[in-house]
Amino acid sequence: MKILQLNLLAFGPFTDTHIDLNKGEEGFHIIYGPNEAGKSSALRALQQMLYGIHTRSSDNFLHHHSKMRIGGVLRHSDGSELEFIRRKGRVNTILAVDTGKVLEESLLETFLGGVDADTFTTMFGIDHSKLVKGGEKILEGGGNIGQALFAAGSGITDLRKVQNDLRGKAEELFSPTAKKKRINEALSELKQKKKEIREAQLPAQEWQRHEQELRNAEKRIGEVTVELEGKRAEHNRLGRIEEALPLIGKRNGLLEEYKSYADAVLLPENFGERRGDFVTKLRIAENERDQAIKAIEENKKSMESIEISEAVLESADVIDELYRELGSHQKAARDRIQLQTERGILWSDAKEVLSGLRDDLTLDEAEKLRLKKTEIVEIRELSTR
């Protein structure tokens, strides 16, 4: 897998920052910058682009957790490419760039080739603190981090075996009490050369002159270094100004354009929605108006065609009386439906009660169960006795 582009859309101190890693045949890039420039944030963004933004990420000081986004473009060994955006969340965090639809995690896993987050961090995401710690472990001759770092850099899979082999070779080359070994002979020769150097050393005055020239050169180096830092700071400042010039020009243009709208009436934020509602209501009202006008015209034509009967006018009182009675009849018709419903309910209840008494009788034959007056008197007497 090759990382072609890292897009820091909303992460840490970055907003819409794109790092192009596509150039170069081998894809080797060096990213440098002063302290607090965001190098460590970019490294964290690279790791979290591939394996997900941490739940309690501390890189939300500029962008809220829900707004954090990291994008990237990857190329597989088979030549296929994947462009996506990673959002913060627990599930469905990989999104397509053009549509915003959720992509399957398995699609990204084919590019990772089985490398999990811990392995990636150990092998490829080494920051300064881990590098120092790994170096110390290597020097101590132990520790998984040290072996992993050393193996990742040199391709050696068994650090302990290599250390033992190196120790054996060192003993073959040197021993404190030996004289014939290679390093011992070299030390003897070095001692002789040092003796010759001491004999050939410069006089004290010449040495002092060279030492004074060295101090002057070191002083000049310090002055040039200070001057260089000042020039770099000035260069950075001018670079920022150069980058800001198009934005300043655009801002001035917008300010001039804004002056022409200074007298414009400020509309509320929901003006468009309200206008749409009013336009819809206006269309409805106009339609209702047209229908009402049409109905009025039809009513006028109907009224013109009506022939007034004197007999009907003379019977006005009777018609009013019938109209009032019509209301009673209509109410009775409505009550009749309710009464029929209640009758059906009572009829069902009566059937259920009758079936509990005698299941051989129908509801029409229930009158047979009614007690005669003589039977009622007899029952009362028996009850009294």
Image (tube, grey):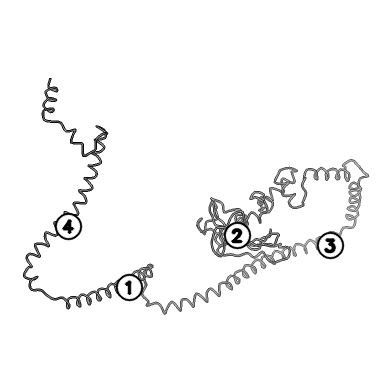
Pointer 4: what residue? 330
- x, y percentage for residue 113? 68, 53
- Near mark 4 (Cα within 10 A), the count class, few <14, some 14-19 or many ≥20, is few
**Tag in front: 4 or 2:** 4
Question: Considering only vertical position in the picture, is 364 above or below 1?
Answer: above
What is the CA distance from the residue labelled 4 to the residue labelled 3? 135 Å
Pointer 2: what residue? 38
Pointer 1: what residue? 283
What is the CA distance from the residue labelled 3 to the residue labelled 1? 105 Å
- Near mark 1 (Cα within 10 A), the count class, few <14, some 14-19 or many ≥20, is few
Reading the chain from its start, which is encountered first: label 4 or label 2? 2
What is the CA distance from the residue labelled 2 to the residue labelled 1? 58 Å
Q: Secondary structure at mark 2?
A: loop
Question: Considering only vertical position in the picture, is 268 above or below 194?
Answer: below
Q: Residue furthest right?
A: 180
Reading the chain from its start, which is encountered first: label 3 or label 1? 3
**Tag in front: 2 or 1:** 1
Q: Please state, as top left, top right, bottom left or bottom right, where the C terminus lies in the image.
A: top left
Identity, as a three-letter code, of the amino acid under mark 2: Gly
Identity, as a three-letter code, of the amino acid under mark 4: Gln
**Tag in front: 4 or 1:** 4
Left or right: 275 with respect to 148? left
